[in-house]
Amino acid sequence: MEGYKYLSTYILATVIHDLTVQFCKAFIDPRSRTVDQMVQAARSGKQNIAEGYSMQSLEGYIKLLGVAKGSQKELAIDYEDYLRQHHLETWPKESPKIRKIRAFRAIWVKPNIPNTSNLPTNPEVAANMMLTFCQMETFLLDKQIQALTQKFIKEGGFRENLFQKRMNYRRRPWS
C-alpha cells in the first residue's frame, strides 16, 4: 500500500467519502446540486491528503492538507445545514451519543476497504454521525498540519535543502 494509505486522516477521509455518497443517495434529492457539492467536498478531503503526501515539498504538503481540512469543514457545514433545514436536532458534543460516535477509529480491514460503519437509516442519527466524523477529521488534520509545520521549522523545506546541497557542492575543493 502507498504510504498515505497508512495515515489515519486518509482512512477516516475514505470512510467519510463512502458514507457521504450513501447519505446523499438515501436522504437528498438526486437532482439537487447539494449532492454534487457534498460528494465533491468529501472526495477533495481524501484526494488532497493523498496528493499532498506524494509531494517532494513539505510546504506543498502542508498547503494541500489545509485544502483537505477546508473541504472537511465545508462538508461539516453541509451536514449542519441538512439538520437545520430538516428541523432535526444537532446533538451537543457532550452528548453520550456523540461520545459513542467519537470512539470510532477508522482502519483498513482489507486493502482499500475501511471499516466503514453502516449508515443509520434515521436521517438525524446519520447526519449527526457524519458531522461528528467531519469534526474528528478536521481535528486530526489540524494535528497533522501542526506536526508537519514543526518539521518544516526544524528541517527546512525542499527548495531550502536543495539550495544548501548546491552550495555545499560548490564549496567542495576540486581535485
Image (spheres, rainbow, N blue to C red):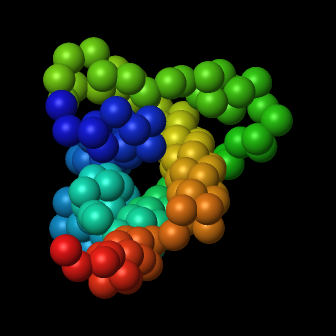
Work out whether residue 149 or residue 43 is closer to the camera in this orientation and state it. 149
77, above or below 164, in the image: above
Can residue 156 be seen in the rendering of this structure?
yes
Name the one closer to the observer, 35 or 70. Answer: 70
Q: Is residue 6 left or right of residue 1?
A: right
Left or right? Give the position of 153 relative to 54: right
Residue 142: x and y, percent? Answer: 60, 56
Q: Name the image quarter holding residue 57.
A: bottom left
Q: Locate residue 145 relative to residue 169 in the image: left or right.
A: right
Asked whether residue 135 is in view, the answer is no
Residue 34: give x, y in percent of width and height: 33, 68
Give the image location of residue 38, x and y in percent.
Answer: 34, 62
Rendered residue at 77%/43% (across/down):
92
- In this rendering, position of residue 65 left or right of residue 111: right
Residue drawn at x 82%, y 35% as measured from the top left:
94
The residue positioned 41% from the left and 72% from the top of the image is 161
Q: Quadrant of the C terminus?
A: bottom left
Q: Residue furthest front?
A: 175
How many marks on residues?
0
Q: Nearer the viewer, residue 42 or 50?
A: 50
- The quadrant holding residue 149 is bottom right
> Which residue sits furthest right?
94
What's the residue at 18%, 31% (across, down)? 1
